[in-house]
Amino acid sequence: MACGCGRRAGSTLTASGGTATSYTYKVTLPSGEDGGTYLTPLEAKREVRRAGGGTIVRVADTPT
């Protein structure tokens, strides 16, 4: 029997039956302009590093 390692979850329901909250990461560059929105914190950190600074804000996405 396979362990299922590396597979993605098939559902976004939590153990209590509610829906899980997903997040995106919004980058603001040092100049004040928008640096974009990223799906993972690693992508956002790479953009901040590439730009030479900035801030990252985690934004909760509401499921539809």
Image (cartoon, grey):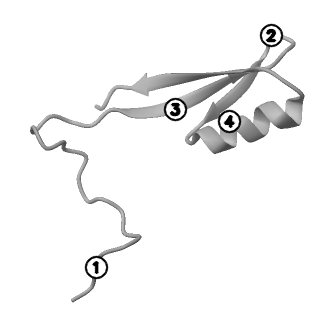
**Mark 4 or mark 3, which has the lower sequence index?**
3
Q: Amino acid at mark 3?
A: Thr
User: Position of 39 compared to 29: left or right?
Assistant: left
User: Position of 33 compared to 25: left or right?
Assistant: right
Image quarter in which the C terminus is found: top left
Q: Which residue is mark 4?
A: 44
How would you rate the neighbour count of disc 2 (Cα within 10 Å): few for under 14, some for 14-19, many for 20 or more? few
Hey, which quadrant is residue 55 in on the image? top right
**Which residue shows up at 65% across the image and 43% down it?**
42
- Dots 1, 2 in contact, CB < 8 A: no
Task: Depth check: give the residue in front, 62 or 13.
Answer: 13
Q: CA distance from mark 4 to mark 1?
A: 32 Å
- In the depicted structure, whether residue 18 falls above or below residue 56: below
Q: CA distance from mark 4 to mark 3?
A: 9 Å
- Dots 4, 1 in contact, CB < 8 A: no
The x and y percentages for residue 39 are 55, 41
Hey, which quadrant is residue 7 in on the image? bottom left
Q: Which residue is mark 2?
A: 32
Q: Which residue is mark 3?
A: 24
The x and y percentages for residue 5 are 36, 73
The x and y percentages for residue 12 are 25, 46
